[in-house]
Image (cartoon, rainbow, N blue to C red):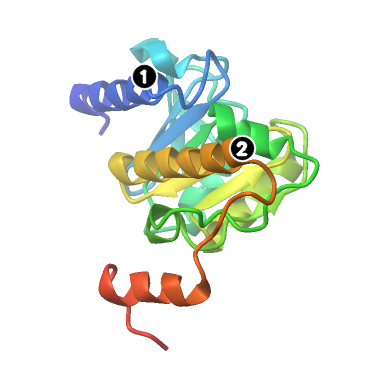
């Protein structure tokens, strides 16, 4: 069921996250729906930039239980919860990139992240912000799973970020563009940046994404 090729691909994509500095040391985790009800999840305490085969857990998505390998990440509950809820998504990435994590710790967080067209196009025009919950807690898992049921990105206060994607490229792209938006927001300073208007976002929907207006 789980092949050598699956393992190699998962390792390659985990290292890719590290190369982009979307997370440091053991601060993030990754999951991938390989097929049907089986997912690979990075192991607890593992470092994505140097993930190895012995750091990969095989989990049952429906039950949330590991079936092989090491203990999965303590955030595996929301990874598997999102994969259960979102049949259209196959990858979940929890990361702590520099500027997005700064924003997660801000007292006055932005309510609109649409500073460049790539955000509404790929991340979604609305990015929910959830309160702080202890890492690994049921409260955090429930909040992230709920947020990613109707959105593709979420900001976790005083913690980090999570995205879900159809595949690795999709999840990776959302994470990179979210980080770009947060970098613009932080470097521009509060009140010193513009966001796309509703009309401009509508134009993107119609002319770039090909969405039919309701």
Q: Quadrant of residue 98?
A: top right
The residue positioned farthest toward the bottom in the image shown? 214
User: Which comes before the other along the chain, label 2 or label 1?
Assistant: 1
- For the N terminus, the image quarter is top left
- For the C terminus, the image quarter is bottom left
In depth, the one of 39 and 30 nearer the eye is 30
Q: Select label 2 or label 1 by which is in front.
A: 2
State how far apart marks 2 and 1 are (Cα).
Answer: 22 Å
In depth, the one of 5 and 177 nearer the eye is 177
Kindly identify which residue carries mark 1: 19
- Where does the image place residue 142, in percent across and percent down from the top left? 68, 49
Question: Does residue 213 show up?
Answer: yes
Q: Quadrant of residue 202?
A: bottom left
Q: Mark 1: few, some, or many residues within 10 Å (few <14, many ≥20)?
A: some
In depth, the one of 11 and 205 nearer the eye is 205
Secondary structure under badge 2?
Answer: helix
Residue drawn 48% across and 54% down?
Answer: 152
In depth, the one of 104 and 167 nearer the eye is 104
Kindly identify which residue carries mark 2: 186
Seen in the picture, residue 177 relative to 28 is either above or below; the reply is below
As drawn, is 87 to the left or to the right of 147? left
Question: Does residue 79 show up?
Answer: no
Seen in the picture, residue 144 relative to 24 is either above or below; the reply is below
Q: Quadrant of residue 69?
A: top left
């Amino acid at each position: 069921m789980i092949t050598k090729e699956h393992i190699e691909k998962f390792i390659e994509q985990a290292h890719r996250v590290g190369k982009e500095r979307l997370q440091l040391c053991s601060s993030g985790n990754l999951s991938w729906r390989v097929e049907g009800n089986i997912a690979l999840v990075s192991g607890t305490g593992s470092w994505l930039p140097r993930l190895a085969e012995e750091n990969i857990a095989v989990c049952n998505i429906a039950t949330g239980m590991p079936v092989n390998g090491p203990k999965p990440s303590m955030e595996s509950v929301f990874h598997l919860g999102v994969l259960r809820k979102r049949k259209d998504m196959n990858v979940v990435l929890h990361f702590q990139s520099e500027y997005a994590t700064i924003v997660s710790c801000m007292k006055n967080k932005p309510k609109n992240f649409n500073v460049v067209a790539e955000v509404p196009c790929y991340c979604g025009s609305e990015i929910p912000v959830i309160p702080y919950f202890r890492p690994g807690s049921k409260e955090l898992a429930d909040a992230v799973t709920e947020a990613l049921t109707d959105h593709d990105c979420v900001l976790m206060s005083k913690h980090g970020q999570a995205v879900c994607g159809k595949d690795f490229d999709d999840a990776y792209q959302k994470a990179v563009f979210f980080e770009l938006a947060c970098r613009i927001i932080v470097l521009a300073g509060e009140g010193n940046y513009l966001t796309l208007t509703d009309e401009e976002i509508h134009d993107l929907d119609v002319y770039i994404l090909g969405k039919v207006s309701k």
